[in-house]
Every structure is written in structure tokens, then in C-alpha cells.
Image (spheres, helix red, strand yellow):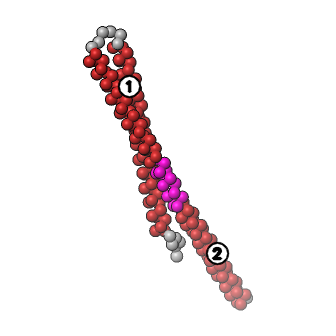
Amino acid sequence: MAFRFPLATVLRFRDSMEKREELALKQILMEIARTRLQIEQLTRQIAQAQRAVEKTLEKPVSAAHLQSMVNEIDVLADRKKALIESLASFERQRQIRMQAYQAAHRDRRMLSEMADRQRDAYEQERARREQKFVDDVFAARAQRGWRSG
């Protein structure tokens, strides 16, 4: 008879929960990385726009053009600020997802270790039974050999 872990269904469920939480964590980590990249890009764009304003100020320029350039910087800065705020939200979500993943991992690992211990105990018991059978066969053959001798 093969080894059967009585909580195999629960273990499969815990394994799927762990994988689901891991996937959710990876998704939020990807969102954080994407947002950070966008923030870096906006930072570079803002710096370029500020350099352009400084260069433009070296020569005569209309107030409307200068105002347009400043407005562009303000729009970029507002987008950057919004991304920084969303990054903070993503970081809170990451923390929650990390805790959920760690709990799911711990629960699955506990059941996996229990299954491993039970499998080891089963294998030891099976090996003991097999050895007893071999010993009984050997003893039976030895007794037949003494009787015929």
C-alpha cells in the first residue's frame, strides 16, 4: 500500500494559496518598479526642461513662451508628485502582500514538513515490516532444514 497523507487536500490548497500570494506580491513589486522608473524619467525630464528654461533666458524671449515652458515643468512636477504618492500606496500594499505571502508560506511549509515526517515514518515502518517478512521466511526455511536433517 502506498503512502497517503491524510491532509493532502489541505496541503494542495495551502500550496495554491502560497503561489497566489507570491504572484500578487510579484505583481505589486513590478508595479513599484514601473512607478520608480516613471519617477526617474520624470525627474530627468524636469531637469531637461529646467535647463531649457535657463538656456532660453540667455536670449530675449516672449513671456508667453517662458510661461509655457514653466507650465510644462509644473505639469511634470505634478505628475511626479502623483507618482510618488501612488508609490507610497504601493509600498503599503507590498507590506501587506509580503505579510500574507509569509503567512501562506509558513502554513504550507508546516504541512509539507508534517507530510515529510509522516512519509519518513511510513517508510521506516514499511522497511521494518519487509525485514520482518524476510526474517520470518529465513526462519521458516531454517526450521525446515533442521527437520529434514
Q: Residue under label 2, please give it.
A: 128
Asked whether, in this view, residue 28 is left or right of residue 129, the answer is left
Q: Is residue 53 above or below residue 146?
A: above
> Residue 19 lies in magenta, yes or no?
no
Magenta stretch, residue numbers:
94-108
Q: Position of residue 38 (x, y in %)?
A: 38, 34
Residue ID for mark 1: 46
Would residue 25 be seen by someone viewing this image from the given angle?
A: yes
Identified by mark 1, the residue type is Ile
Tell me the kind of residue under disc 2: Arg
- The residue that appears at 51% across and 61% down in the rendered structure is 108
Q: Is residue 62 left or right of residue 141?
A: left
Looking at the image, which residue is at 42% across and 46% down? 28
Could you tell me what secondary structure mostly forms the magenta stretch?
helix
Residue found 48% across the figure and 48% down from its top: 95
Depicted 6 relative to depicted 105: above or below: below
Q: Position of residue 148 (x, y in %)?
A: 70, 89
The secondary structure type at the circle numbered 2 is helix
Res. 123 visible in picture: no
* Image position of 83 with respect to 124: above or below: above
Crowd band around label 2 with a 10 angstrom C-alpha radius: few (<14), some (14–19), many (20+): few
Depth check, front residue: 101 or 113: 101
